[in-house]
Image (cartoon, grey):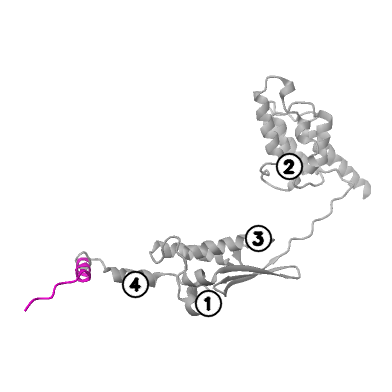
C-alpha cells in the first residue's frame, strides 16, 4: 500500500520545528495577537474595535488634525494625547512586530474615512475626531485672547528702527547693524528666535552682500532695510528698557571694540525707551 506523500505545508512545519522556530501560520497568529487594536486604545465598538491601528490610519489622522482651520490641535490633552499621537505610537509598534505592513490601512478607516470636526462654543471650539464614524477624541481649545491695543502715545520698536533709517540711513549696513536689527525684531515680536525672512534675515543678507561690494555706492544702506520698518515687522510693541538693553548688548557683542554704535539701532531703541518711561512718569 503506497504511503501518503507529505505536503509542502507539512515540510515547512517540520523544518520550522527542527530549527526551533514556529510554523509560518503560528507566526502570523502571534503577530496578529500582539497587535494594538482600536479597542485597546479608544472606546469604540464593532469591527473597528478589533482592527489593528495601521500606519496609513495614523497618517490620515495627523493630516486631518493639521488641517483643522483656526485651531492648533494639542499633542497632549488633559493628561492624555491627541488621537494622531496615540495612533502613530500604536501603528509604529504594530509595524515593528509585523502585525501591519508599511502604508497599510485598516478596512474600516479605508471604507468609512477619518475626519476631524470643530464646533464653535463661547470662548473657544470643541474638536471631535472620528475614525470610521466613531469618536476617538474630543476636547476643547480656547480662543486666543483679543490683542491688547497699543498705547498710541508710546514709541514702538518699529518706529525707533524707522528713526535709525532717517538719521543714519545712508551708511552701509554691516554685521553689527544686522545683529542689532535682529535683536530689535525679536524684542518687537516678544520672541527668542528671529522670524525667518524678517528684518533680521534681510539685514544679515545685506551685510554679507556688502562685504563683496568694492564701492560704497554699490552697498546696501541701513535705510534700504529699515525704511517703513513698522510695516515690515510681523509685530510691534512699545520700546522698553529691557528691549534697549537687549539691542545694545547685541551691538557690543558683535563690535570689535565691544562698544555700542553711536547713532545706531541700539541708541534709537534706548532713546525711545527713555522717552516712553519719561512719559509714563509724567502721566502718573
At a point 88% along the width and 48% down the height, the residue shown is: 152
Separation of marks 1 and 4 at Cα, in angstroms: 23 Å
Q: Mark 4 or mark 3: which comes first in sequence?
A: 4
Within 10 Å of disc 2 (Cα), the crowding (few <14, some 14-19, many 20+) is many
Bin the neighbour count of mark 4 within 10 Å (Cα to Cα): few under 14, some 14-19, many 20 and up.
few
Mark 4 = which residue?
29
- Counting from the top left corner in percent of width and height, residue 200 is at 70, 38
Q: Secondary structure beneath disc 3?
A: loop
User: CA separation, marks 2 and 4?
Assistant: 60 Å
Q: Circles 4 and 3: CB distance less than 8 Å?
A: no
**Which mark, residue 185?**
2
Residue segment shown in magenta: 1-15
Residue receiving disc 3: 72
The picture quadrant where one finds residue 220 is top right
Secondary element type, mark 4: helix
CA separation in Å, label 3 and label 1: 25 Å
The percent coordinates of residue 107 (x first, y second) are 47, 71
Amino acid at each position: 500500500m503506497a504511503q501518503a506523500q507529505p505536503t509542502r505545508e507539512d515540510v515547512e512545519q517540520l523544518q520550522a520545528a527542527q530549527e526551533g522556530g514556529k510554523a509560518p501560520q503560528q507566526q502570523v497568529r502571534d503577530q496578529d495577537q500582539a497587535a494594538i487594536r482600536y479597542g485597546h486604545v479608544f472606546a469604540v465598538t464593532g469591527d473597528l474595535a478589533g482592527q489593528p491601528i495601521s500606519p496609513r490610519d495614523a497618517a490620515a489622522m495627523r493630516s486631518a488634525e493639521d488641517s483643522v482651520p483656526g485651531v492648533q490641535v494639542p499633542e497632549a490633552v488633559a493628561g492624555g494625547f491627541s488621537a494622531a499621537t496615540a495612533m502613530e505610537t500604536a501603528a509604529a509598534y504594530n509595524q515593528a512586530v509585523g502585525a501591519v505592513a508599511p502604508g497599510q490601512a485598516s478596512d474600516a478607516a479605508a471604507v468609512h474615512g477619518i475626519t476631524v470636526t470643530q464646533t464653535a462654543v463661547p470662548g473657544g471650539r470643541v474638536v471631535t475626531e472620528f475614525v470610521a464614524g466613531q469618536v476617538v477624541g474630543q476636547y476643547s481649545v480656547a480662543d486666543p485672547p483679543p490683542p491688547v491695543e497699543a498705547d498710541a502715545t508710546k514709541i514702538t520698536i518699529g518706529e525707533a528702527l524707522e528713526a535709525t533709517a532717517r538719521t543714519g540711513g545712508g551708511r552701509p549696513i554691516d554685521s553689527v547693524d544686522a545683529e542689532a536689527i535682529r535683536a530689535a525684531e525679536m524684542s518687537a515680536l516678544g520672541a527668542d528666535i528671529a522670524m525667518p525672512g524678517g528684518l533680521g534675515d534681510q539685514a544679515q543678507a545685506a551685510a554679507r552682500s556688502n562685504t563683496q561690494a568694492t564701492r560704497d555706492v554699490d552697498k546696501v544702506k541701513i535705510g534700504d532695510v529699515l525704511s517703513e520698518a513698522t510695516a515690515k515687522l510681523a509685530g510691534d510693541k512699545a520700546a522698553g528698557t529691557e528691549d534697549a538693553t537687549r539691542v545694545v548688548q547685541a551691538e557690543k557683542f558683535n563690535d570689535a571694540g565691544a562698544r555700542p554704535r553711536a547713532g545706531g539701532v541700539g541708541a534709537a531703541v534706548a532713546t525711545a525707551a527713555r522717552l516712553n518711561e519719561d512719559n509714563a512718569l509724567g502721566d502718573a
